[in-house]
Image (tube, rainbow, N blue to C red):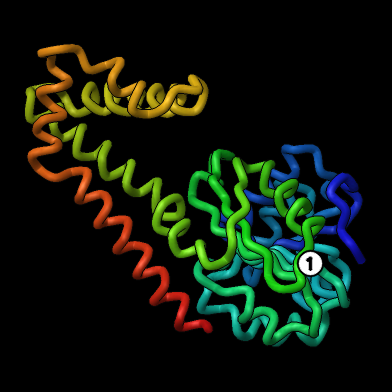
Amino acid sequence: MTVAKDTGDYRIAILGAGKIGEALLSGLVSAGRAPSSLMFTERYEARCAELTAHYGVPAVGTAEAAATADVLVVAVKPQDIEPLLVELAAAITPGTLVVSLAAGLPTALYERHLPAGTPVVRVMPNTALLVGEAMSAISPGSHATDAHLSTVEELLSSVGKVVRVPENQQDAVTALSGSGPAYFFFLVEAMIDAGILLGLPRAVSTDLIIQSAVGAATMLRDSGEHPVALREAVTSPGGTTIAAIRELENHGVRAALLAAIEAAAIRSGELGKAHH
């Protein structure tokens, strides 16, 4: 079956309804997809009952999902992938689109286990998926077509933004946007501490920095201005901001970020090799 972009009538199964799986389920339901076109698998019965009660989406077994869904979204932990692929291989309907949200797993791993010709699309989302502001990068396996990529874009656009990249760029994506929220949290944490150093109460310092971060992010997204132009607009001659920026440069903050993100990409590559 060829999954078309503009038909909402194909059936989607989310395999593994942990935080990420549930967030995607929630996004799809909120975007208006009929609960009857969705299903999920989850090993804990109480969790199944809770999600079904909340979203009106049925819990099914892996074999049933593999046999009946048009799109299988794999949202299990990477260490749980091998037994799942064995189950899927035995039950999957030919032509079913497999979408992998499992960090670091190459499309070749799926293609090795699943029937010949199975289309696979690899996705690197980030935790902002939990608030509908994910940055997801998608890469096609050797059998995934443009139509398959369009389907995945449609699914993921219910929880954020989507970009297409070749699979050999996924380690860079992991380092940049996959781990990206953590770098911002780290920066905000340090800036809150700076407020405390300057004598502000923690709650006040936290409010000041978090809202500044939200405002800056919104300007970056919505103003159409380059980050350098936005930064220059705050940096007056002989003022407070340039004094701060000189110290950031003195302490090599830019170089530290470059080195940190490069280290994350190298680590991503090492983790991926374990599954090749």
Please state which of residues 210 and 47 is positioned toward the viewer in this rendering. 210
Q: Is mark 1 on a helix, strand or loop?
A: strand
Answer with left or right where residue 187 lies relative to residue 88: left
x 79%, y 84%: residue: 115
Residue 141 in which image quadrant: bottom right
x 20%, y 32%: residue: 192
Q: Is residue 134 above or below residue 104?
A: above
Tell me the quarter of the image containing the N terminus: bottom right
Q: Picture coordinates of residue 221 (x, y %)?
A: 49, 28
Q: Picture coordinates of residue 164 (x, y %)?
A: 62, 53
Answer with left or right where residue 221 lies relative to residue 234: right
Classify 10 Å Cα crowding around label 1: few (below 14), some (14-19), many (20 and above).
many
x 20%, y 49%: residue: 255
Answer with left or right where residue 46 lies relative to residue 98: left
Please state which of residues 132 and 42 is positioned toward the viewer in this rendering. 132
Q: Is residue 267 above or below residue 197?
A: below
The three-letter code of the residue at mark 1 reads Leu
Residue position for label 1:
97
x 54%, y 46%: residue: 135
Q: In this view, does 122 lie above or below 66?
A: above
Residue 46, can we see it? no
